[in-house]
Amino acid sequence: YLVDKDGRYERVTDPVDVKAHPTYAMIVALVEGYTSSLSSCSKFAADDNDTEEDPSTLLWTWYLRAVLHEVSGELTEGLELVEKCLEHTPTAVDLYELKARLLKASGNIKSAVECLDKGRELDKQDRYINNQTTKYMLQAGMEDTALERISLFTKHEGNPEQNLYDMQCSWYELELAACLAKKEDWGRSLKKYAAVVKHFDDFHEDQFDFHSYCIRKVTLRAYTAVLRYEDNLWGQQYYGQAAEGIINVYLHLHDNPTITKEEEEPDYSSMTAAQRKKAKAIQRKKKKAAEKKAAEEAEKQMAKEAAADKENGGKKKNTNNKGPQAVVDPDPFGKELMQKDPLEEAKKYSAILSKYAPNSIKTWLLQYDVAVRRGKALMALQALFKAKALVGNASNSDIFARTVDFASKVETLKGDDSAVQEVVASELSVLLNGGSVSDYVASAVEDVKKNPLTDLSYRVAIAKAIVLTKSSSVADAASIIVDGGINSTGVTASCCNEALVALKSFGNEAGEAITKWSEIVKAKFPLML
């Protein structure tokens, strides 16, 4: 579905835009006509003189119609049609994958996992469906079960994660790192993100072997291709995701320094006897919990090794020095990574992204997040201008939120340097379109009123900005989300949940809006957990 935008064709992906596209309407009419005809006479057209189509033709026509429901955001209708397909042919694996996608988009990742795993059981030799099941399990927070699934296609003795690391399976490590971050297991999350970074370090080192190989074999085309790849190695998608994850974790650790100090002994000297007794009891509980967790992890590891030995026919591990030896990780929980200076580490990776991935908006958003915490006003300002240049005149919720954030913190960031103060004041005025931050927010509110299809995430950012700057009432802020937000673009289950979290952060004044929004979202996503 292509649209002409500023003289260039762009593919529309949002359900609202897809549904309004004439090509979509034409395809839907064709498919529904085929479905009706195939159901009645097993032909694509009633006056068709050809022989009757196979029963599977109707099945895949239904499947295509379900996909069209998916791209247009008609999730309930899509699920109903997929169920009809499964009644027709319950052994088609593709149907389970489509149903899982629809369930996930509906906000029910648990049911999506169950559905996809059921489809995986139908073809255990299919690596693709196994990988998809693993990915969904990680997104559902089921990392142990996900490891069992991915281990079905790994060659290992003892620990399958070591084999996945050796095979540089970056997609799995990135999904696992994100899963662990959601569970606030920051150390292990950093370990997995760092593993992906290490893969790229290995790619960089391995290129030297390739140089000498190409000179001997004279494969110049492959040689120039790898040189171009190496030039942009640190700008690759997987590296960008790993660096983004590391930066976000370290920024969270910087904002919450007590996380890294939990294991440190408190200062008992300044406490009373009662306080000292209570603090020591808390420390004992923490120590006991940590020991229990370590014991559980060790038990899990032993169970994995026992299962691996059983799969290998009960062969014992090689006790001599011949053959591969098990790798022992001296820091399995990432405690050493957590003890590093968070801002320095975040600064290091944001600098790499700024140099090698300058055309990514996320690069400059991360650069801003790091710079503003370091108190670097000019770097933060530069990052905002760079990000804004990439989107042009289009609205972006992340850029808008950070612009308002910078304007609210500018007095503490400018410092004592008169030259810096002058530049910041001048350029901030440009960033705010010549007005104050309240005028900037009010202008955004007017844009929403003029365009009812304004992206939901942008509406949420505006509502937060209204409350932050106190440019209007909480009721006005809540109305930006509630009034028409569900019919705008960018409406997903996760975005609706973020909107609900934002409304709850507004306090008791938004109580009515919270109830109303919850009912609206429930009607849109009835399966949402």
Image (cartoon, rainbow, N blue to C red):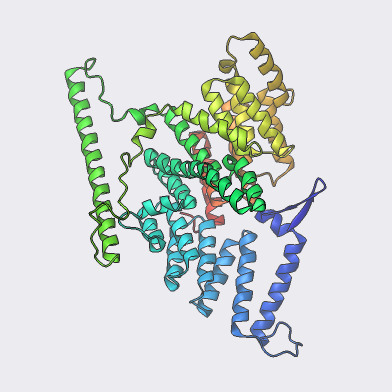
- Pick out the residue farthest to the right: 7
Who is closer to the viewer here, 202 or 145?
202
* Residue 509 appears in view: yes
Regarding residue 480, the answer to whether it shows in the image is: no
- The picture quadrant where one finds residue 471 is top right
Residue 84, by quadrant, is bottom right
- Residue at 68% over, 13% down: 422
Q: Nearer the viewer, residue 345 or 443?
A: 345
**Image location (x, y in percent) of residue 437:** 66, 24
The residue under the point 31% across, 57% down is 157
> From this viewpoint, which residue is outermost toward the front?
216
Name above or below for residue 409 compared with residue 21: above
Q: Position of residue 424 (x, y in %)?
A: 66, 18
Left or right of 138 on screen, residue 300: left
Which quadrant is home to the N terminus?
Answer: bottom right
The percent position of residue 521, horizontal first and vertical second, equals: 54, 51
Q: Quadrant of the C terminus?
A: bottom left
How far across and down, in percent of the image, does residue 359 sit? 66, 39
